[in-house]
Amino acid sequence: MTSLPWIRATVRTAVVSRVHGGDLHLERYSGPPGDPGLMGADGVVWRVHGHPAAMLTGGFAALMLQSLHPLAMAAVDDHSDFRTDPLGRLHRTVGFVTATTFGSTAAAREAIAAVRRVHTRVTGTAPGGRPYHARDPHLLTWVHVAEVACFLAGYQRYAAAPLTAAERDDYYARVAVTAEELGARDVPRSAREVARYLNRVRPELAATPAALEALRFLRSFGRDRAERAAVTVLMNGAIALLPDWARDSLGIHRPRAVRAGWDAPVTRALGGLLVWACRPSEIVTTARLRVAAAPSA
């Protein structure tokens, strides 16, 4: 039993280092007093985005699903440094999600403004000749829906207490705010609207060579044995979150029996370890103290 604190500290340090880059930037979450932030305090978005296993599996699933839009994937392929600096890309993405979820209103809007500035430079032509621009509202809506649908799917599968139908709709309605401030339009605000949106956009989707290369990169990532093992577990858990048609498009042939009988329990075990080691979260604790504090006169 005396080794448990050491195990917990080791896992926690590894997560903070690999996922957050070692610096939690707690100043984003500490003030001003009484500020609930963009997502509202301690609601469904905090529950979903504060669950380590849901966000890691959901994040991997989102990357796979997002890659199926040829224009979105072309933008990533041409402008992202995910091949040369994958952890840097992860740190920036995690920083954006945590700032817009748990940060003060000012910190959230600062993160959104920073992404909007980057998007002005992300423009080009996809293979086949179609132009793309990261400020395109249609692409912004796709990236947002693919991301939050996968985050929620990860929470529903790997959290101890999944959201109710009403809570799922509340989640989609609240996270739509961030997408709209980034420039997305006609953002789905309920589970039914998300399902309809995905059916509507499917004819636009295809697994391009760049998407398949990105999938191979994700599935083989890891700088050491422990990291590769963790990524393998999380990727297999993420694959289970994808719709059947998305797995088919990406050429992922992992039998249902393997996903249910091996991937799910192993991912839940790793997820349980992450939850045990990472809670209470310093970010969430700092945000709660900010929200609970009396507003300044």
Image: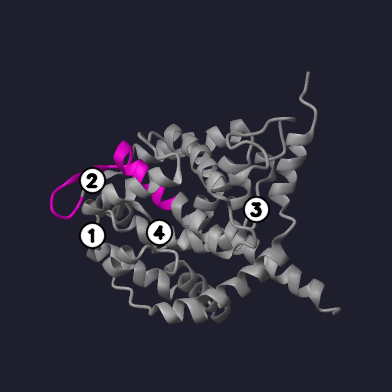
Residue type at numbered disc 2: Gly
Considering only order in the chain, which callout, 3 or 1, is on the residue closer to the N terminus?
3
Quadrant in the rendering for residue 160: bottom right
Q: Report the magenta residues as a range.
A: 126-147
Q: Please report whichever mark, 1 or 2, sits nearer to the chain's N-terminal start.
A: 2
Looking at the picture, does residue 269 appear above or below residue 124? below
From the viewer's perspective, is residue 146 above or below residue 141?
A: below
How much space separates mark 4 and mark 1, taking CA atoms?
14 Å
CA separation in Å, label 3 and label 4: 24 Å
Which type of secondary structure does the marked residue at label 4 adopt?
helix
Question: Mark 2 or mark 4, which has the lower sequence index?
Answer: 4
What amino acid is labelled 4 in the image?
Leu
Q: Is residue 29 visible?
A: yes
Q: Which mark is residue 124?
A: 2
**Mark 1 or mark 2: which is in front?**
1
**Residue identified by numbered label 1:** 206
Q: Which residue is mark 4?
A: 63
Nearest to viewer (mark 3 / mark 4): 4
